[in-house]
Every structure is written in C-alpha cells, then in structure tokens.
Amino acid sequence: MSVRAKILTAIQQIAKEQQVTLPPLTDDLSLHETGFDSLAFAILVARLEDDLGSDPFTISEDAAFPHTVGDFVRAYENVPA
C-alpha cells in the first residue's frame, strides 16, 4: 500500500472513530475543512508514525504544518529514508 493510501485510510478510520463526516479527500482540500480537531490530528500523526516509522513534523526543525490534504501527504512522501 502506498504512503498516500495509508494516510487516506488512516484519515477515514479516525473520522469514523471520532464521528466526523469527511468531505471528499482531494489534494486541495484544506485540513481545516476535514472537520478534524486537534485531537483527531494528534491521533492521525501518532498512528502514521507507528505505521510509517516517521513523523515529518518533528524530524525537521523548520517543518511547518501543512495546509491541505495534498501538502500533508507530500510531507510524509518526502521524508528522507
């Protein structure tokens, strides 16, 4: 499964658990528009770190939190090996 697919699956699973109705997950969807609150994002990042073995937001000192779903996916896709 690709990094993108793992991230989108995790978002959908957490939305179900948190009872969040997700709009269609497109690259240009603002993360704010997902309906996730700070707890849901914290759960997402923690699960992805467990699943993918990295957290791109703590690896880099100058990493900024992404604004869109596409930015979020690319942050994980661009983590150095």
Image (spheres, rainbow, N blue to C red):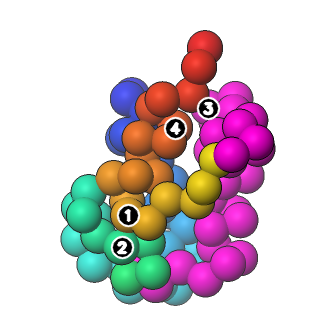
Instruction: Identify residue for label 1.
Output: 68
Q: Earlier in the sequence, mark 1 or mark 2?
A: 2
Residue drawn at x 73%, y 52% is 46
- Main SS category, magenta section: helix
Say which element carries label 4. Answer: helix
Kindly report the distance in space between the C-alpha atoms of the residues bearing marks 3 and 4: 9 Å
Residue drawn at x 48%, y 29% is 78
Mark 2 Cα-neighbour bin, 10 Å: few <14, some 14–19, many ≥20: some
- Residue 52 belongs to the span the image colors magenta: yes
Eyeballing the image, is 31 above or below 43? below
Instruction: Identify residue for label 4.
Output: 76
Q: Residue 44 appears at what percent x and percent y?
A: 62, 59
Q: Earlier in the sequence, mark 2 or mark 4?
A: 2
Instruction: Identify residue for label 3.
Output: 52
Farthest residue to the front: give it.
Answer: 62
The answer to whether residue 6 is seen in the rendering is no
Q: Earlier in the sequence, mark 1 or mark 4?
A: 1
Magenta segment boundaries in residue numbering = 34-62
Kindly report the distance in space between the C-alpha atoms of the residues bearing marks 1 and 3: 20 Å
The part of the image, by quadrant, that contains residue 45 is: bottom right
Residue drawn at x 33%, y 53% is 70
Instruction: Identify residue for label 2.
Output: 30
Q: Earlier in the sequence, mark 2 or mark 3?
A: 2
**Contact, CB < 8 Å: mark 1 with mark 2?**
yes
Q: As drawn, is 66 to the left or to the right of 65?
A: left
- Residue 57 belongs to the span the image colors magenta: yes
